[in-house]
Image (cartoon, grey):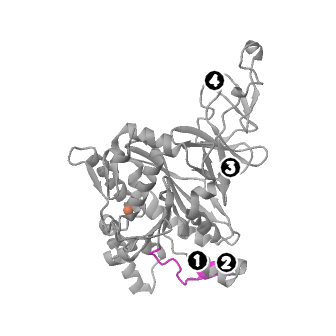
Amino acid sequence: MNLTPLVEPDRVHKSVYTNPAIFDVEMEKIWEKVWVYCGHESQVPAPGDYHAVTIGRQPMIMVRQADGSVGVLYNRCPHRGVQLVGNLKGHAGNSFVCSYHAWSFFLDGSVRAIPLAKGYEGTRMTKENPDCNVKRAARVDSYRGFVFASLAHDGPSLSEFLGEARVAFDDMCDRSPVGEVEVVPICHRVVQHSNWKFFMENQLDALHPSVTHQSTGIAAGRVEKRLKAERGAAPLYYHYLSAFASSFELWDSVQTINFPRGHGILKAYMGLRPQDPDTLEYEALLKQAYGEQKTEEYLSRSIHHVLVYPYLSVQSPLQQLRCLRPISADKTLSEIWHFRLKGAPEAIYRRSLWYYNLVNSPATMINADDLENWTKGQWGLASNGGDWVSFHRYAGDDRVENGVTYSNHGTSEAVMRNQFRAWTEYVSA
Ligand SMILES: [Fe+2]
């Protein structure tokens, strides 16, 4: 299927969001080839701990193995093909046992026992045959505790694939006095009734907040202002919401940086360093660990979101991570995780927990307003009302240096143009 005519530099054909056959091409040529985020090492602390995870259309298991490494296996018994684990997470002990005929497998996937083995004697399904092992992901690697797997034997290393987007994980971990984060072992799972690309485009779309999130931002801003007048200060979490109603001029001044492979950064627009006792205590801990200069460097990186295309939005300054697991052309599962800075005061965790609950949770108006847009977007594109989706805003106005596109306007649709450049390279490879 030749998909290149569907993508022009400043517009794309609606079918890339709606056509199930194109969705299958994406799964095969992008998701089942690139490095996909599986989870954080702290989700599987002890040997036998596992998390079920989907890579493209493939059900997989991330498991802590007996030697302490993290492995990724296909969630499929080699006997009759039944999934080995039915839970999202659990503890397998020292082996996975299939619930159908009790074939068992060590944590690295190798077959441990075939019950009533006599019945297989003389056939090809004996323990010596590697086909009796659970198939493993072709490649597994991690970066600062974040585990990725690729189902393709060849291709760039994880570090090459992430490229400049590695800063997502550096920025998150460097904010801990010991340089590490641990997962908060619960996440929101939300099914978006829209194509996965809606979410990825939206994450760096600085044109939409002052429209979509205006009512929530204005309401929060009113309370914030009143509290400041009455008490001299308002808790930081009012700012999380009121910032959405910032002026158009402010949004337009926030730069996006668009890397090869569709990755990107929306620079910071919120102030996250109030001078309250909790923040001062936290910053003193960082200075103790890293010295004055490094601490300043770590705390002043200008990042709101980092995107790892095509599935991750990392909000490193507040230790949030959202990961997409596409289901179909018009349905996308999102996992919304958050992390705790190891060695940081409890108050700093509470502060990012507020962001998790107020902005990224499906129970907030911010997330709900976005979800409504994406659903209506999917419905609109499925109609006969038009064929093209426009990404013309500030086309030709961005600055390109060494393959990196810097927007001169925060509201430039450079983000989407860059994502579709990567998309075209992947699907036409
Ligand atoms: Fe939004």
**Disc nearer the start of the sequence (2/4):** 4
**Disc nearer the start of the sequence (2/3):** 3
Give the residue pinned by disc 2.
Answer: 286
- Name the spot of residue 424 as percent of width and height, x first: 42, 50
- Name the spot of residue 110 as percent of width and height, x first: 74, 33
* Residue occupying the point 41% across, 84% down: 228
For label 2, count other residues whose C-alpha is less than 10 Å away and answer few (under 14), some (14-19) or many (20+).
many
- Contact flag, marks 2 and 3 (Cβ < 8 Å): no
The residues tagged by marks 2 and 4 sit, at their Cα atoms, a distance apart of 52 Å
Residue 299 tag number: 1
- Disc 4 secondary structure class: loop
- Judge depth for marks 4 and 1 and give the one in front: 1
The residues tagged by marks 3 and 1 sit, at their Cα atoms, a distance apart of 29 Å
- Disc 2 secondary structure class: helix
**Residues rendered magenta in the picture:** 268-286
- Disc 1 secondary structure class: helix
Front residue (pair 354, 290):
290
- Name the spot of residue 278 as percent of width and height, x first: 59, 79
**Disc nearer the start of the sequence (3/1):** 3
**Disc nearer the start of the sequence (4/3):** 3
The residues tagged by marks 1 and 2 sit, at their Cα atoms, a distance apart of 10 Å
- Judge depth for marks 3 and 1 and give the one in front: 1
What amino acid is found at the position of numbered circle 3 in the picture? Answer: Val
- Contact flag, marks 3 and 1 (Cβ < 8 Å): no
In reply to whether residue 281 is colored magenta, the answer given is yes
Residue 100 tag number: 4
Give the residue pinned by disc 3.
Answer: 44
Res. 349 image quadrant: bottom right
